Amino acid sequence: MTEALVPQPRRTQVPAGLAAQLQEAVLAVDGVSATYPARPLRQVLAAVAKEPVPHIDVVPSDDGLRVTARIGVAADHGPDVARSVAGAIRRHLAPQPVQIHVSIVTMAPSENR
């Protein structure tokens, strides 16, 4: 008995250097003070000896790319900065579909007081 092949969703390939490009775009957003490794600490520690750990995680998904960014921001603008980061990532990857998750890791008082 033979089974018909069911087409599988095609996963988007992640271009080499994309994580570094996205990190530059994120750091260029006004209000971002730092980026942090996007993966849990245990994964970071396991990868340290093997290769540099990206601060922006880009993985293929069934419907585009999934991007995770962890950032530091000024305390008085956190949510706005996180939205701006998501927008910068979306613009960089347009028109490709993307799911974006931005976490604020640190918040420091603004220096403009």
Image: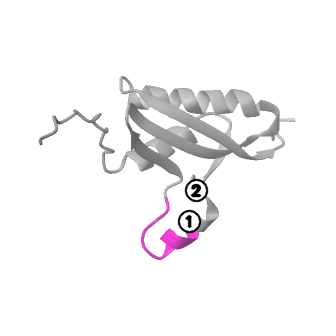
Q: Residue at x 44, y 45 (%)?
A: 58
Position in image of residue 45 (x %, y %): 57, 71
Q: In what element is the residue under mark 1?
A: helix
Name the foreground residue: 4 vs 13.
4
Position in image of residue 59 (x %, y %): 42, 45
Q: CA distance from mark 1 to mark 2?
A: 7 Å
Q: Are marks 1 and 2 in contact (CB under 8 Å)?
A: yes
Left or right placement of residue 95 versus residue 33 in this view: left
Other-residue count near label 1 (Cα within 10 Å), few / some / many at <14 / 14–19 / ≥20? some
Position in image of residue 86 (x %, y %): 56, 30
Could you tell me which quadrant the N terminus lies in? top left
In the current view of this chain or complex, which residue is farthest to the right? 113
Q: Quadrant of residue 29?
A: top right
Other-residue count near label 2 (Cα within 10 Å), few / some / many at <14 / 14–19 / ≥20? some
Q: Amino acid at mark 1?
A: Val
Q: Residue at x 31, y 50 (%)?
A: 16
Q: Earlier in the sequence, mark 1 or mark 2?
A: 2
Q: Is residue 55 above or below residue 109?
A: below
Asked whether 44 falls inside the magenta stretch, the response is yes
Q: Residue at x 49, y 69 (%)?
A: 47
Asked whether 47 falls inside the magenta stretch, the response is yes
- The span shown in magenta is 43-53
Nearer to us of marks 1 and 2 is 1
Residue marked by disc 1: 44
Left or right placement of residue 78 versus residue 32 in this view: right
Q: Is residue 18 above or below residue 96?
A: below
Q: In what element is the residue under mark 2?
A: loop
In the current view of this chain or complex, which residue is farthest to the front? 1
In the current view of this chain or complex, which residue is farthest to the left? 1
Residue marked by disc 2: 37
Colour option used: one colour
